[in-house]
Amino acid sequence: MENELLNYMSGNEIIDYVNNYINKSNYNYAVLIDGSWGSGKTYFIKNSLIPALEANEKSRKSQNGKPDNKKIIYISLYGISSKEELDFQILLEVMPFKSFFNRKNIKLASNIGKAVISGVSSFYGILLPKKIIDFSDISSKNYILIFDDLERCNMNVNNLLGYINNYVEHDGIKTIIISNEKEIASTNMDLNRELKYLVALNNDLVLNDSKNESDVSVDLFGDEKHEDNNEKVNVDELLNKINIIFGQDNLYKKIKEKLVGVTLYYKPDFNKIIETVTVNSINDEKIKNIIIYNKAYIIEKLNYYNHQNIRTILFCLDKYNNITENLIKALGFTRLEKLLDDMFKYTLVISILYKTGQDLPKWESNNEIMDVVVSKNIYNFNSYIKGFKFIDNYIKGATFNKEKAIEVIKRYNELENKQINDPNDPLFILNNNWWLIEDEEVLELINEINETLKCDPNKYNITVYLNIITLNIKFNRLGIQSKDIKEIMDLMKNNMKELKPEKNDSFDVFGWSSSDFETKEDSKLFTECANELNNYLNDVNNETIIDKLNYFLNNQETWSKSVDEFIQDKEMMLIDKRAFISLFDFESLVKSIKNARNNQIIEFRVALRKIYNFANIKDYYLDEKEYVDKLIGELKKYSLQLVYNQKIKNNNLKYLIKDLEEILGKLS
């Protein structure tokens, strides 16, 4: 956690302090702005501090009333490995190369000029003749230096501070340093780490019993006797020993004390930053509103996971923007409206978990949407959010699977439309308020639900069966009831078998998962129930779908329209089943196509496109390859018979054959 003893300052407070520092001529020291990695220091410097300093400089006037503006030179130290590279970066900022050939001379601050010209003699292959450069006319006090990314510089940090000190102490230049000091110590420790370990493990190394950390001696000749110590080395003691011997941190502190007059601890204003980056990152106004509406949620999760990191927010917004752009284009805003808020919250949480190296949710193979725990306090109102497997996969680095996401959302909306929305229904009441109700009423309501399964099997769609199982398991655990779950399962299975085909539906666990339970035993029981119901319903549906499709072929006048309507209603069920055309009796289908009118052939082509019109059909319908190939062969034979007497039908048949060949190509 952040050190609560530090006096963190807001962006506006830092701007006020730095402006005062610039305005006071007697402040002969540098200011260091310290902030954690990803906290948005650089963003703040470039977008807030520098513009504020420039505005301040424009308003300043010297004693004689003339402008007294200082030029701000911003230098990123990231990756710079030598004084010469740093000289060159400063040179690029100071020298007006754009008008190089239009001027007779170039004037630089004297000491800056002396420093940079000694290390740089050419610019992009153009020699810089010293005789054209005049360093004498401009005071070095006309500049403000800002050095960013101190901890990411490849130079030795102590040498770097000594370099910067020349500008501060000798030239009197106002200088601001941006750093994450937590990383500086680890950077120093990483230099020649192996050699430091070897030295610190040397038994001939004597650390005298002294408060002076530099009081270290080595028995070079082995004259002193040391007891053999075969004990295991404590890691903390070893690191402390290295720090005492090499003294990098101590030297850094001494140089810093000489150079830096004050350290300002930056803490970002996330309310302002979230609005700014959202406006700059998101194009769709409705999506912008969703994100800004969730500002408090964003800040809550950043604090909960102790990860106040602007880069993670930007990462999240980029992923969410791409997801929503693709889905809105494909499905429209209205069909997504209820899920967009859930998808943003989940994208945010998964982005934080991924960026902090924490475990992501564990998904069952047949589950695409589930409630995910996001708080250790299960009684917290925000302890669960709706999770999406396709978002997990995208965050982890996979290409966004647009087709899969569309399939999942369509299925989810289909299931949501079949949920209980009657506020007086006992299932609706328990789903939304059971934790607010007294035991007696809860028992009465769950008994009514279970009795309805027996007495009125058509009332509850099977898509809510897992919901009912969940409530029964929870109330058993709480001791409100002691219901036999197997008895409820048997009722559900009987209902599935007895339901009329047009009332039957596919069954999955969207929105309900083992993450809803407090104990592993309950989670295991739920998973077993879900798998058992799924397997049973698959068996029932196998019989039902095959019977239904082949029943359509019995009516030559309506078969193609009936098949198309069936697909319209049961598309997701057929995708789950991973079969369509092979479900037809082959001889009956060939006979229906041969006897079909022109409009029926076209209706059947439309039906095929609805089922097979996505890129990865091979993952779903590979087993149908042989059936499709066989059907193409039969239709080609029949086509030869139509050449002379049914030219339009033959033309339509050729297009059907072409469609089937395209499907076969995707399956190959």
Image (tube, grey):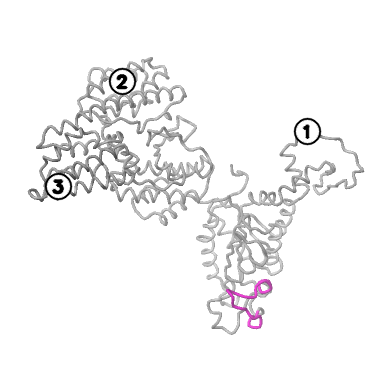
Look at mark 2 in the image and give the residue it sits on.
445
The residue closer to the viewer here, 147 or 262, is 147
Amino acid type, label 3: Leu
- Tell me the residue that label 3 is attached to: 640
Answer above or below: position of 66 versus 424: below
Q: Which amino acid does label 1 sit on?
A: Glu
User: Magenta part of the protein: which range?
Assistant: 115-134
Q: Do the residues labelled 3 and 1 touch (CB within 8 Å)?
A: no
Q: Distance between the residues labelled 3 and 1?
A: 92 Å
Asked if the stretch drawn in magenta spans residue 133, the answer is yes
Q: Which residue is drawn at 22% across and 42% down?
A: 633
Among the 4 quarters of the image, the one containing residue 56: bottom right
- What percent of the width, then of the height, locates residue 93? 58, 70
Among the two numbered marks 3 and 2 on one chain, the one whose residue lies closer to the N terminus: 2
480 or 527, nearer to the observer: 527
The residue carrying pointer 3 sits among few (fewer than 14), some (14 to 19) or many (20 or more) residues within 10 Å by Cα, namely: few
Q: Which residue carries the number 1 mark?
A: 231
Report whether 102 appears left or right of 318. right
Quarter of the view holding residue 409: top left
The amino acid type of the residue labelled 2 equals Leu
How many marks the image carries: the answer is 3
Image coordinates for residue 32, horizontal then vertical, percent = 63, 57
